[in-house]
Image (cartoon, coloured by chain):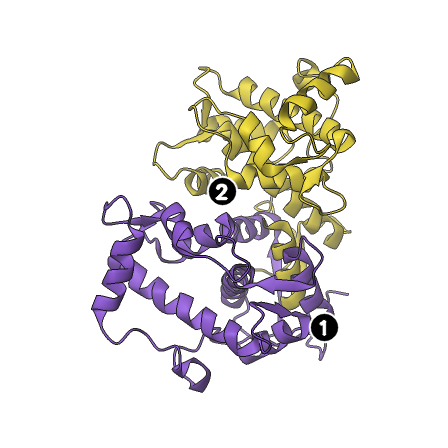
Chain colours: A purple, B yellow
Amino acid sequence: MYSGEGSEDIPAYPVQVYPVEGPRYGQYAPPSSNSEVQQWFAAVDKDRSGKINAKELQAALINAQGNHFSDTCCQLMIGMFDKEKTGMVDVNEFEQLYIYINQWLGVFRTYDRDQSGAIEEQELGQALQQMGFRFSPSFVKQLINRSDLENHHKMSVDQFIVVCVQIQRFTEAFRVRDQQMQGSITIGFEEFLGVALEASV
Amino acid sequence: MYSGEGSEDIPAYPVQVYPVEGPRYGQYAPPSSNSEVQQWFAAVDKDRSGKINAKELQAALINAQGNHFSDTCCQLMIGMFDKEKTGMVDVNEFEQLYIYINQWLGVFRTYDRDQSGAIEEQELGQALQQMGFRFSPSFVKQLINRSDLENHHKMSVDQFIVVCVQIQRFTEAFRVRDQQMQGSITIGFEEFLGVALEASV
């Protein structure tokens, strides 16, 4: 079953998950000046420490359902750019994060065609395809189900960001082990654990 | 590098992560009567819904550093027994969780020899060995480092529980794919992602 042979059933994974340039992202371009980022940063940095942690970010972000972004989402976002592993980002790291947040919002809005603030299974599949992933329908369904605690078969924007960050992390971990681009890897127990744990919150 | 051949460098993983019986666990036996669990449940179920969610559990659990158990820890614990995926456990599921919490506390206290309320790298290695894992020193160091945001080289009890639950989940996912017990698996991209995502919070 996991013979390592190439198969049409094994989807390719993209070389770059989030193209920074491209028509889809054009409308959510980085801010035209640093001052916009700095204003955002100053507004979010409530304790004026010069750093933003996950709680401060969470207080600033509300989804279309009227809920603050989840703990997991905010921790994952901070963790992406928090190079010193302090649980906080400075203004330069925040600028990179700000660009990412806007890109995610852009993809999300593009596929949230009825502007409901939530995307459904088919829309999620299209969004992931746009990012370069060819996932099976059953996998897309699994993604919706694990996010969808209320059984609405929908995903909010922060749930979407969580899925994007986690897929990106695991894809990178997979890619460095699949130098031949075969679509499968052979991995030992401890290394498997290490990869899986490193990419979890 | 990932040839799939058996090697002395690949540690075996245990068939059962948490032996329910055994001398180490004797002193943290399940409560002698259901009423003890029911009292705990009633105290934790603040909204008297008949169910406990991660927030209620978090309000009831404080580590030796005086902090409530982390969001991640409480979500993982609820998720272990929350069979209907509602984000809550009922009193029967809670009874199983209660037994687990006490087992983890038992292992933690056994290896926290100076009773500091935190375990260090060497102690963590011994605790995991007691659970049947033979991890390399560098892997144990990695486990401490990912939990240790304050650079104290120590792990609190809730961080320890997070590590235990995550290792257990990933071990189970690995084991079902390694029927021959070779210590390595060959896995395709989508399945790798599915396993990794399923086991994350």
Which secondary structure lies at badge 2?
Answer: helix
A23 left or right, relative to A8 = left
Residue at x 48% of width, y 40% of height: B143
Residue at x 66% of width, y 18% of height: B24
Q: Do marks 1 and 2 share a chain?
A: no
Residue B44 is situated, as x and y percent measured from the top left of the image, at 63, 26
Any part of residue B152 in sight? yes
Any part of residue A132 in sight? no
- Determine whether A66 is above or below B129 in the image: below
Judge by depth and name the residue closer to the eye, A177 or B148.
B148
Q: Could you give the CA–CA distance between mark 1 and mark 2, rounded to whole angstroms? A: 36 Å
- The amino acid sitting under disc 2 is Phe
Please give the chain letter of the residue carrying mark 2: B
**Other residues around mark 2 within 10 Å, as few (<14) / some (14–19) / many (≥20):** some
- The amino acid sitting under disc 1 is Pro
Judge by depth and name the residue closer to the eye, A5 or A194.
A194
Q: Which mark is residue A137?
A: 1
Residue at x 44% of width, y 15% of height: B114
Could you say which quadrant of the image residue B172 lies in?
A: top right
Residue A28 is situated, as x and y percent measured from the top left of the image, at 39, 77
Viewer-nearest of discs 1 and 2: 1
Which secondary structure lies at badge 1?
Answer: helix
Q: Which mark is residue A167?
A: none
Q: Which residue is mark 2?
A: B139
Residue B201 is situated, as x and y percent measured from the top left of the image, at 58, 48
- Determine whether B104 is above or below A190 in the image: above
Could you say which quadrant of the image residue A42 lies in?
A: bottom left
